[in-house]
Amino acid sequence: MARGRLTPEREAELYEAVLDLLREVGYDALTMDAVAARTRSSKATLYRQWGSKPELVAHALRNDKPVDIAAIDTGSLRGDFLALLAHTDECQIEKDSALMRGLVHAVHDHPDLLQALRELLVEPEVTGLGEVLARAVRRGEVAADNPALQLVPHMVLGLFVVRPLIDARDVDRAFLTEYIDAVVLPALLVRTPRSQP
């Protein structure tokens, strides 16, 4: 989709409005009319810029990512995971958890949304995480043939859906840190002292 007529500031404003509406009404009730009204723009502009509701939602989610995962390199896998968490505040983690739970349900009924999310959000995040894990392999922290390497994205993303079901609580930074230390790193056979921050 050809884009570029909007300033980066205006684009960010539109993305923020899309995410706010998504949190308020959910994917099924989100309409391009509502986005146009909230952002004081025309529906034609939205369709010209993004082509469809799934594309707009996926771009908004991608724009909301606090950091490029692959750019994080602290020298240790645990340090990289903690640095990633440090880029997101507690409020954002809670909002993202609720948003992702809603989208997990929506993708079952909307294959076009699933496709857009895979292309614009999931694949870049998995690729970035793959870079972080590849560096850990090169440093000798993780064996290259460890079968858990390919399951790390499943472990981490699944957590956002499962914790509210099991504990009736959203994921927060403390829980993510504990999960990384107790589940992800041991699965990768990375040794970490529990006393590290």
Image: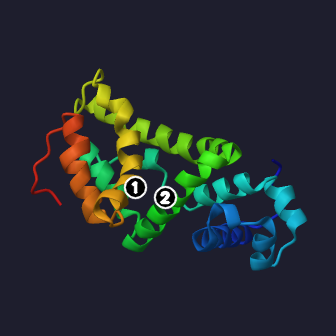
The residue that disc 2 covers is 101
Which is nearer the eye, 26 or 146?
Answer: 26
Does 17 appear above or below 139?
Answer: below
Quarter placement of the C terminus? bottom left
Instruction: Please indicate whether residue 2 sits to the left or right of residue 83 in the image.
Output: right
Does 62 appear above or below 42?
Answer: above
The percent position of residue 193, horizontal first and vertical second, equals 10, 49
Determine the CA span between mark 1 and mark 2.
7 Å
Kindly indicate the quadrant of the structure image that contains residue 160.
Answer: bottom left
- Dot 2: few (<14), some (14–19), or many (≥20) neighbours within 10 Å? some
Is residue 134 visible from the viewing direction of this image? no
The percent position of residue 49, horizontal first and vertical second, equals 82, 57
- Circles 1, 2 touching at the beta carbon (< 8 Å): yes
Is residue 27 visible from the viewing direction of this image? yes
The percent position of residue 88, horizontal first and vertical second, equals 41, 65
Q: Which of the marked residues, 1 or 2, is nearer the chain's N terminus?
A: 2
Q: Which mark is residue 160?
A: 1
